[in-house]
Amino acid sequence: MKATLQAYVRKGLFYKSVVDDGSDIIFIVDYDGNILYHNRSVSKTLGYTTTLVGKKIFDYLPLSLLDNYKKQFSDCTRKTYNKGIEFQFLCKDKSYKHLEFNSVNLRKKEGIKGLILDCRDITQRNRDAEELLRAQKAKEQFLANISHEIRTPINGIAGMAALLSQNPSHEEQKTYLNAIKSAADNLKVIINDILDLASIESGKLKLEKIGFNLNDLLHSLIDTFSMQVREKQVKLTYTLSADANKTFIGDPVRLNQILINLIGNAVKFTHVGSISIHVQAQKVKPDFYKLRFDISDTGIGIPHDKLQTIFESFSQADVSVTRKYGGTGLGLTIVKQLVELQHGEIFVTSKENVGSTFTVYLPYKVGKTAKAAEAHHYQPKGKDPLKYHSVLLVEDNDINRLYASSILKMWGCHFETAENGVVALEKIRNHSFDAILMDIQMPVMDGFETTKAIRQGDPKKRDVLIIALTANATPQDFQKCLDAGMNDCIVKPFTQEDLFTALNKHLAHKNTPRKKEEKTGAAPATLVDLTYLKKISNNNQEFIKEIVQTFLESMPQSIKEIQTNSQAGNWEQVGKVVHKIKPTITLMGIHSLKDKIVLFEQEVKGNPGSAQVTSLSEEITKALSQTVDSLRGKVNFG
């Protein structure tokens, strides 16, 4: 084998395989550009079946670039070797191929005025580079859009919050609060778009198979956009064929998401005229239908050359569209991927300044009952449906805690709060709860550690319902919560509907009234006695909670004032502070301090700075601090 191969090389038999039949195009040309030889790749790559020998290579180069190519060719005649020279060569079909050649100058070694040009087809490489550049520019534009889209609502929220702190009128307050809500809703849409796309592209998105009714779903959608179309004076209607007015089995949330995106786009880009939604059903099998959704508008339309890219990530029809109308450029990408995940198809027809029609085909099985998926609708039935349930809210963020507390309070729930896992475990030891709303990321002890401790703790309480509250919204994060022993997960930012749906799903079958001792919310009798407070309020629990809350908010400052002025020897000011809080001590029933305060007031007037005054001051602040800590740990004031 070795001898045969050596002979093959010695005789130059490899020439035919390497040069004549090689994949690269080989040209031998003189210094004037006359072609003296080319191999067979000219036929394979450029399509020529007749020889190009005797032709000038310059005759096959683009006229507009010829001067530049001739200059590069001239450079090659002065160098021994040159590489990476890009040029375009005319093919038999009149198109141009992008080629790149390395040149060998025969004059330097052979004394011949000629060049060997080893040419490689780089047409696909250039296309790939152009596509990569286009995608990169689109991504950069998307990031700029996202930055703008996120900053705009955040700026609005911060600005409106600042205005609210400047004592606005009642009407102004309503305006500012509506603006904050609108900005927060916009921010949530943007974040959800990004998370949905990540979830879809990672293949982690799970589709539900539950019953839903199209008529209910479409009616709800029309209501959702009613305010926007009324403001724009655009008509929004829907028609539902008789065959489509059934209960189907599928994922109504994802269908709703598809239609919201498409209708939202139609509303955004339609300034005059109408938007119509038409739904038809085609029976494929006895229990299987293909539904067709047509969303048509009389809006600005889409340019013909953009119709192929509007479903791509980070893409909108034009940068000016983003500047004028806003948006992330992810809506139609998500729609297309959601449609395809459900084995459907989506098409678009459009004409500029006339309008657009998006057509979606989705397959669904027919349900056996007419019952829709109530779990996805916020429909609290009866009076205070969660009134007789006790909930522990474990949340370290003050604003999130206030938000969730306000919702629970509105529903009439008995609830307590904890700012971290350690406080939560202490409350669980002393009380029984029907549900625990558990934040994940907290100081001291996080939600995972707390859940583990509960599941391994008191056998009577280890099976309590635990619902995670998390800002980490990927499927992996959801699964991590379930693996840690939690029963369900609510993604922040959540709505009242989200919270009600989760609680009602698990607690609907439990309607046990609270125990009396839990209902009173009484603190340990050793420090606080609320008998007087109950008497003057006719045991109004809301009033009591407000008084206790006010005490907890104001007393730490009073304690600090007493301590600061005591250390500075400003006993007159200490006396004023103690006198100021004396009615509160009576109201809260802190009996252990009544006599001490009376004695302190007597002594501080006659003997300011004495050992007894100093000792009484320390005893008062210590007792008040213990009372505050006790109330924070034991009293339910929402």
Image (cartoon, rainbow, N blue to C red):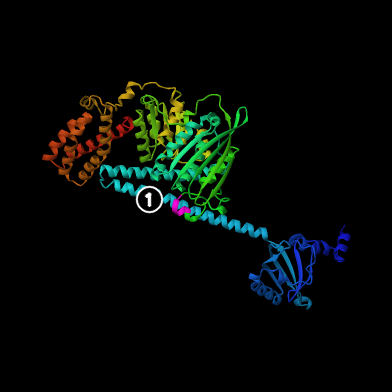
Q: Is 140 drawn above or below residue 274 in the view shown?
A: below
> Percent x, y for residue 167?
25, 45
Left or right placement of residue 186 versus residue 241 in this view: left
Left or right, 35 with respect to 488, comes to right
The picture places residue 502, in percent across and down from the top left corner, at 45, 31
Q: Which residue is mark 1?
A: 155
Q: Is residue 86 above or below residue 498?
A: below
Q: Is residue 324 a member of the stretch shown in magenta?
A: yes
**Is 201 in front, or is 624?**
201
For mark 1, give the secondary structure: helix
| Range shown magenta | 321-326
Q: Relative to the observer, which residue lies in front, 216 or 596?
A: 216
Quadrant assignment, res 398: top left
Q: In the rendered view, would you say 187 is above or below 240? A: below
Residue at image x 26%, y 39%? 556
Q: Residues within 10 Å of mark 1 (few under 14, many from 20)?
A: few
- On screen, residue 11 versus residue 150, left or right, reads right
Rendered-image quadrant of the C terminus: top left
Q: Callout 1, which amino acid?
A: Asn
**Residue 354 on image: x %, y %:** 50, 49
